[in-house]
Amino acid sequence: MKVLVKIPAPLRQYTSNQKEIEVTTSSNTVKDVIIELTNHYPELKTRLLDETGSLRKFLTIFLNNSNLRDIGGETAQVKDGDIITILPAIAGGKTK
Amino acid sequence: MEDITKLIGNTPIFRIEPWERGISREVAIYAKLEFYNPGGSVKDRPALFMIRDLEQRGIITKDKILIDATSGNTGIAYAIICTSKGYPLTLVVPANASEERKKILKILGVNVIYSDPLEGTDGAQAIVEEIVSKNPEKYILIDQYSNNNNWLAHYNTTANEIIKQTNGKVTHFICSLGTSGTFVGNSRRLKEFNPNIKTYIVEPDSEYHGIEGIKHLKSTRVPKIFDPSLVDGEFFISTERAYSIVREVAKRYGLLIGPSAGLNLAGAFELAKTIESGVIVTVFPDSINRYFSNQSLWL
């Protein structure tokens, strides 16, 4: 299935400046999709995952219109056509 | 009618006994409790100075609208001042501002334009610039990122309070950067008072972090008021560590500080580990009240 991941401005320098990346995956969960993303863009790994391979706890991530925290966290199930949005902290801002 | 702006400034200073290893007993660490300001944050000071400057120059008129980009705290500061004075105000705020900030702005009756959260405050600034360029006769741009009255507020108030409250014994100042006004204003005045005082910055260790209101300099627009010549050194702290400091301060002192305060105190601890003696002062910009909806603070 295909899941669209929206990339916040501070991280686009690690995704060849792409704002959105379509991840083709057989994964079932948001966490798996993010891990798949970091496999393609390795510099995202330490920024999105902690040392145990889980999503860093302070991340604000939306699955479609729902905050991940409200729908079960990183194990929330994804389906074909879903949109995952990774939000920045407020003052992150653009890369130069 | 009583003037709320009279309550701005003259905040308490609080001594923190460090609990991390490697810090000499001869090092004292203090924090200015800026959430004692009526707007709830350090931003009340620069907001007052910037608006006062516009008043004194005769620029503010009741038919013009004050406008700026803000991650929230400055917007709240502007709002309490403008409300008390009857000045119309429009703010551009990234849509991922905390729910608490959004509710406060709503209660204060501010016109808020929420900008794309993926673009952060840089995106909000860009929108403000576009709005003002299209309607220059309608708006007065306050521009906290370029306005010298931002850092002058701290030069004229916060720094002098620090000098008085430490009996002139302050040796080091450290804080993080949002607009950089707190760092620039305090550093300039403190170094003027005593050229031996060292001034440091602390930043999140990544461009992608969870400290609302704070910049990672290399990856963002550098505020025009920032002066790198004032930086004697810097420290980088992870979001997770800043959050853990917030929780520790709550448990040890019953003091409920915000994430940027946790970042600042972590930086003060790191600085303390590099010196044998001294009086380090930092700033607790706001309290946890604006971040209860950030559940990851408690995990």
Image (cartoon, coloured by chain):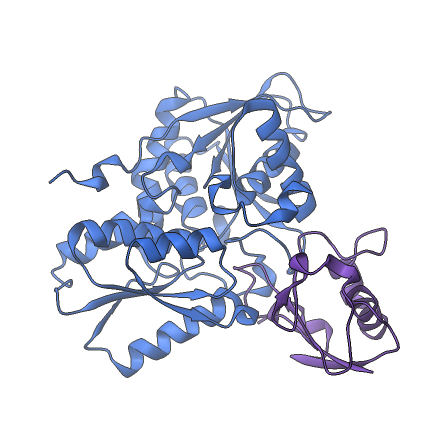
Chain colours: A purple, B blue
Which image quarter: residue B70?
A: bottom left
Nearest the camera: B201 or A51? Answer: A51
Where does residue B273 sit, x and y in percent of width and height?
68, 29
Indicate the position of residue B72 as horizontal and vertical percent values. 42, 55
Q: Is residue A39 left or right of residue B61?
A: right
Q: Is residue B105 left or right of residue A80?
A: left
- Vertical order, B175 against A65 (above or below): above
Name the quarter where the C terminus of chain B is drawn.
top right
**What residue do we see at 66% from left, 52% from top?**
A58
Q: Nearer the viewer, residue B180 or A61?
A: A61
Image position of B3 with respect to B137: above or below? above
Compare residues B171 and B136 and report the one nearer the observer: B136
Q: Residue at coordinates 21% horizontally, 37% vertically from top-left?
A: B6
Report the residue that reaches farthest toward the top: B25
Q: How far from the left and from the top, in percent, is residue B38?
A: 31, 39
- Judge whether B3 appears above or below B70 on screen: above
Q: Residue at x 26, y 54 (%)?
A: B50
Question: Residue B36 at x, y = what percent?
Answer: 37, 34
The residue located at (73%, 58%) in the rendering is A73
Count of labels shown? Answer: 0
Q: Residue furthest right?
A: A26
